[in-house]
Image: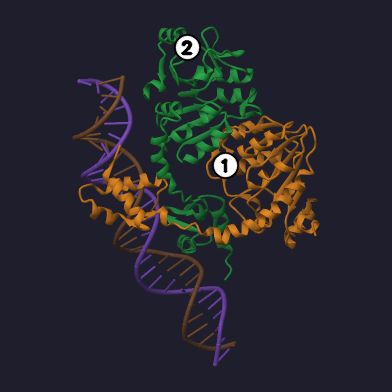
Chain colours: A green, B orange, C brown, D purple
Amino acid sequence: MYNERREQIRSLLLSKPFISLKELEEMFPDVSGMTLRRDIEYFEREHEAIKVRGGARSMKFITTQTDDSITARMKENIHWKDSITARAAEFLETGRSIFIDSGSTLQRIVPYVPNDRFTFTTTDPVSALELCKIGLPIVNVVGGRLDRDNQTITGLQATRFLSDINIDIALLSPSGLSARSGFTVGNYSECELKRIVVEKARLVIILMDSSKIDKSLPYTFCTFENIDVLITSSALPEELAALAAENGVRVINVEEENK
Amino acid sequence: MYNERREQIRSLLLSKPFISLKELEEMFPDVSGMTLRRDIEYFEREHEAIKVRGGARSMKFITTQTDDSITARMKENIHWKDSITARAAEFLETGRSIFIDSGSTLQRIVPYVPNDRFTFTTTDPVSALELCKIGLPIVNVVGGRLDRDNQTITGLQATRFLSDINIDIALLSPSGLSARSGFTVGNYSECELKRIVVEKARLVIILMDSSKIDKSLPYTFCTFENIDVLITSSALPEELAALAAENGVRVINVEEENK
DNA sequence: CATGATTATGATATATTTTAACACATCCTG
DNA sequence: CAGGATGTGTTAAAATATATCATAATCATG
């Protein structure tokens, strides 16, 4: 027997992860809710959906990743490996608006982000896609031109986009840090963008591996005055440590902590 | 935090496909039903179970065997997707502003894009990253909320972003096409976005494999009146073909062409 | 084509489950 | 110790699911 209505519902089921009964009732005003319930039962029998309160979840979108729990355990073990990002993840607060910088450093934070109601905003498409997989967090992608070399979104539109949103916590990673120039990057529009973020954020956290220390690049996006926390993988040279202390910046050296 | 009760429930979840709340209440008479409900919610967040009426279904036992019937069909289509996108790539004009829709169909166009001075704008982070690798093209990413399930960027900000740019050529792919409803998708904000694109573009090209024919989803983003070219992988049914002809739409059937 | 069987559907009252809101205790951290 | 996060319990109200019966449509088959 061929049933046009069910075919339509099947298409819907293939196009999104959840269909509510209300939705179906609007879509098919000619049939009773009872019939639509029976349709859902039918799809459940066919293993194409799972009946849940209020509607049905599409099988197509159900990820049977039992590995999840296992990877969760592993997180604790890898802890020391990606220690900088793992440490940074501890600063995330549920419900907050959090900016995630682009670049390989911040991409590694994803495994340490708990499945909670954060709102992330990022200029890094790779991070965005990864953050999305976590589940609960809302992920915003900054709009603008995608820079081929740095895989980061910048430009006029990006600037404008950021001006429109609020940021509680910003996680940033510079290309260089020196006493004279502060936190620097090699690209003007990237710098401009980070400046806006620093200005807007209530809590600015810098993630930086030791290779960036005492390097300086052309564009300074902030100094110790503007930041709250600095997470590194080695002790800071005296001059920088003094500057941090002067400005009340909390310095976390993960190498030290993991000893 | 370590929770003995949840560990026990987890074991249960790994040992059978469904747990009822009653069962859990008998098992843990010391805690309230509410707590057990919250436990189930927790497992749902962790993707270890799905909350259903009366209890929870264990992920471990959920057979995503829908693959058999449905993905089998999709595989057939994949073969055609490449011919469709290859054909669509021929419409690209150097120097133009081109919108690339999100979705698996359009992602496949990247290999066929020549290394020329195009300006692409897309709602698909995956396509954006791929397009970037080509070299010469400028790639814009639409800003906004990244939808977890469809991996597409939509929302208010996306709408606003698109309003600010010009589009010469739009490549779009619907979830359904029917004579009554036109070109449809299953999601409101996606629809809204596509509508704007259709309105702005000088040349609208629809890419559609045959599985979408005679399907209709809740939201119509355009009809034959609004489009210029339709590329498919099989002949259109008479009714649709007539509609296309009526509206001067050029229909390209790659199956026919490749014979 | 008539007929009985099967299937699809609708209406409604009832039963059950779920949610939401608040209150309280506990634990941890700075 | 204050403040925050977290885990928990209680309840009433809301939403949803089920069961049942009645009716209509469909279909195979003698």
Disc 1 secondary structure class:
loop
| Any part of residue A33 in sight | yes
Q: Residue at x 61, y 35 (%)?
A: B159
Marks 1 and 2, Cα distance to the nearest angstrom? 37 Å
Relative to the observer, which residue lies in front, B198 or B46? Answer: B46
Q: Residue at x 62, y 33 (%)?
A: B142
In the rendered view, tell whether residue B77 sits above or below residue A117. Answer: below
Left or right of B167, for residue A160: left
In the rendered view, tell whether residue A207 sits above or below residue B204. Answer: above
Q: Quadrant of the C terminus of chain B?
A: bottom right
Residue matched to label 1: B151
Q: Position of residue B209 (x, y in %)?
A: 68, 54
Relative to the observer, which residue lies in front, C14 or C30? Answer: C30
Provide the chain ID for the residue under circle 2: A
Please name which of the two marks, 1 or 2, marks the residue nearer to the observer: 2
Residue matched to label 2: A224
In the rendered view, tell whether residue A205 sits above or below residue B104. Answer: above
Q: Residue at x 47, y 58 (%)?
A: B63
